[in-house]
Amino acid sequence: MRKPVVLITGAAGEIGHGLIHRLSGEGVHSIITLDLKPLDETLGAHVERQFTGSILDRNLLDRILSEYEVDMVFHLAAILSTRGEFTPLTAHEVNVEGTLNLLAFAQSQGESHGRPVRFLYPSSIAAYGLPDLGTKHRAGRVREHEWNQPITMYGCNKLYCEQLGRYYSRHYKQLAAGDLAGRVDFRAIRFPGLISAVTVPSGGTSDYAPEMIHSAARGEPYACFVRPDTRIPFMAMPDAVDALLRLARAPREALSRVVYNITAFNPSAEEVRRLVLEAFPGAGITFEPDLKRQAIVDSWPEDVDDSTAREDWGLAPVYDLESAFHDYLIPRIRERYHA
Ligand code: AKB
């Protein structure tokens, strides 16, 4: 007999870290993971089994299929927006072909155990592309269907994979004799920049905010790569994990969309710097904009409209900007770096 489990890809990354702690703490699901690198020992202790390998390895996915009944997939593995611009073809391979492999895997799982497989997909504000700063300011809170013209390979990949997920959910093999659609129950969240007290991101373009905070706590100078007035939406990691789980647990009939915006606060880089300086008054934070990375962040909306997520599945972030700093980030980061 195969064992029913939840599969998390990219589990060693930022979201995976928080998700494994939350899920294992609830004690409801057994978790298996797939990542290029093994989980650190503490995290590894919370999972039933780790597969070390690539989402591009279909034989490995077949092995997982033969051993486990997967009811839910959190497909977190991806190459982020900055790293993807150095290796766009690899980014496409990992972000699109990797996602397609996981969708095909979920379809086979659904066909084999007979239940729809919930497929949770972290998309991103990188799926948006606003042409210039004036338009960005005028656009304000962007809705899901607006400004879908991403300028990064990562953003293009995310936008397309949202469509692939919708295809698998609703139209898969629509001309076949039997009805094969609906075995994959695909649900996506367009995440804002995420800030964790526990992990430091790498390879993204929203990384300036978390980098600023973690560098200050380590007592290291930080040159911020965007202008002080740069503004995009952010969220604290516990709220991001909570959102993923709320969407995962929502009844199918409550969902009016496949893809949902979410956000919690949208400070300028200067506002982030001020909050960091309140906590670490000696921090050496300067602004040295990298014009190319700046252009990527400038193409992302300064805010998003997440009212449908709130209505459909009860999105309810706990942390606003002030409380994210005072109640979550600063105390936890001080503890981590003994700062
Ligand atoms: C990135 O910066 O690439 C990510 C994202 C906004 O999806 N953090």
Image (cartoon, rainbow, N blue to C red):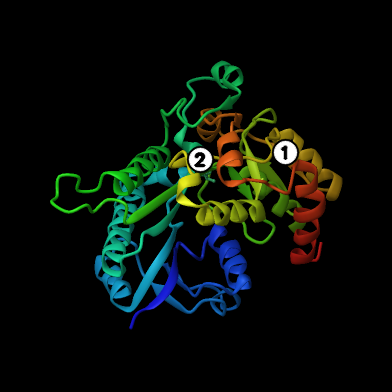
Q: CA distance from mark 1 to mark 2?
A: 35 Å
Residue 101, position as x, y percentages in the image: 29, 58
Residue corresponding to mark 1: 286
Circle 2: element type? strand
**Quadrant housing the C terminus:** bottom right
Which residue is at a point 34% across and 80% down the rendered structure image? 2
Which residue occupies the extreme front position in the image?
253
> Which of the two marks, 1 or 2, is nearer to us in this view?
2
- Residue 233 sits in which quadrant? top right
The crowding category of the residue bearing disc 1, from other C-alpha atoms within 10 Å (few below 14, some 14 to 19, many at least 20), is: some
Amino acid of disc 2: Tyr
96 displayed left or right of 134? left
Residue corresponding to mark 2: 260
Is 17 rendered above or below residue 225?
Answer: below
Which residue is at a point 38% across and 53% down the rendered structure image? 185
**Residue 123 in sight:** yes
Q: Which mark is residue 314?
A: none
Numbered circles on residues, count: 2
Residue 112, position as x, y percentages in the image: 27, 68
Which residue occupies the extreme bottom position in the image?
1
**Quadrant housing the N terminus:** bottom left
Residue 223, position as x, y percentages in the image: 67, 42
Amino acid of disc 1: Thr
Q: Earlier in the sequence, mark 1 or mark 2?
A: 2
Is 10 rendered above or below residue 152?
Answer: below
312 displayed left or right of 58? right
Which residue is at a point 52% across and 19% down the rendered structure image? 132
Which residue is at a point 61% across and 23% down the rendered structure image? 140
The crowding category of the residue bearing disc 2, from other C-alpha atoms within 10 Å (few below 14, some 14 to 19, many at least 20), is: many
Circle 1: element type? strand
- Residue 294 sits in which quadrant? top right
State yes or no: Cβ of the residue under disc 1 lies below 8 Å from any atom of ligand 1: no
